[in-house]
Image (cartoon, rainbow, N blue to C red):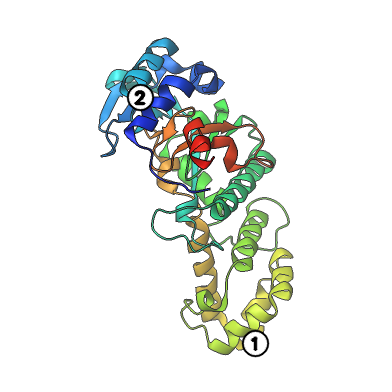
Amino acid sequence: MQLREATPEERLQFYKEEWNKRDLPDFILHTLSLREFGFDLDGTGPSHRYNQFMTVEQLADFLRNKAPYAAYASVALYEQPSMRKGWLKSELVFDVDAKDLPLKSCSCVGGAVCEQCLNEARQVAIQFAETMRSDLDLHNINFVFSGRGFHIRVTDESVMAFEQAERAQLVEYITGCVIPTDVTITLGYSRVFRGRVARTFERLDEQRLLQVHGMRNALAQQLVKERERVLTAIRAGRLSDLENYNGMGPKTFRNLLEFFIRLNSEFTDGKVTIDTKRILRLPSSLHSGVSMKCMLVRDMERFSIEEAAPKFVRERMQ
């Protein structure tokens, strides 16, 4: 499916004929009047900020009259959203953007995305959510297709009051971007870390391994050749096996681990999670850059990009 920019006429058609308030998720609908709304009216950025809507009908009128290039709503709830004052709490969010994945099997460059890298972003989002459920006991986890990736939006009361420092710690835990003191522990962060490292190593080719300071050609070739053996050692917590692998040595081993955690950290934009006043694309709105609907995804395992194609895109394909 070709992802291209929507024309002003197509935006107008979408908001006049297709946009529906029933596509707003409950977690937005039930807190509508407490959120700040922002808009990009012409493709130059979300400069139209500090908007508040008391009813969904007011929001609907604005969208149908303005047909914005992009629509956003705050992850924060405020006493006075139009002034961004009286912060009450914020969703915990993770932004997994297909165009920014540090490792992907497609050839997309710049801001381009395809179905293949979108599927890889979907898998990352699923893994992050599984960790939140199993390790952090979070359950109100919502997935939103953003047009170029996925937003994970968590509304459990236990995390919505978190400040920036606590959210930063969650980013480190979920992504596996800190080396644990003991990687052999079978539960908790050490297990998460090993899983993230294994996922990252699984996608590395010889050329990427050669980016590790001190990595020799012969060693990179051997690591790729014996990938399954190395993955087994990582998952079992035997990372010390790598330190002695084919003469790697402690220095190169440490550089390899630091390379892993840097890549792990790039599977999501941590600044988005930490920022309690962030605005995100409004589920139900149009991502005009790729002509896709931003939408709540109820079944991530079966989600297909065709579900997010608006009517004018389907007509364009006929």
Q: Secondary structure at mark 1?
A: helix
Q: Counting other residues with Cα less than 10 Å from the Cα at mark 2, is it few (<14), some (14-19), or many (20 or more)?
A: many
Type of amino acid under label 2: Phe
Residue at 44% in and 49% down:
269
Instruction: Give the percent coordinates (x, y) of residue 272.
Output: 42, 42
Q: Along the line of sight, which residue is nearer the eye, 156 or 5?
A: 5
Q: Counting other residues with Cα less than 10 Å from the Cα at mark 1, is it few (<14), some (14-19), or many (20 or more)?
A: few
Q: Along the line of sight, which residue is nearer the eye, 230 or 73?
A: 73
Which residue in the protein does label 2 denote?
A: 37
Instruction: Give the percent coordinates (x, y) of residue 14.
Output: 43, 27
Instruction: Give the percent coordinates (x, y) of residue 93.
Output: 49, 37
Q: Is residue 127 above or below residue 285?
A: below
Which residue in the protein does label 1 denote?
A: 246
Q: Secondary structure at mark 2?
A: strand
On the image, which quarter does residue 155 sit in? top right
What is the number of the mark on residue 92?
none
Judge whether residue 145 can be spotted in this image.
Answer: no
- Tell me the quadrant of the picture where the C terminus can be found: top right
Counting residues from the N terminus, which is met first, the one under dot 2 or under dot 1? 2
On the image, which quarter does residue 205 sit in? bottom right
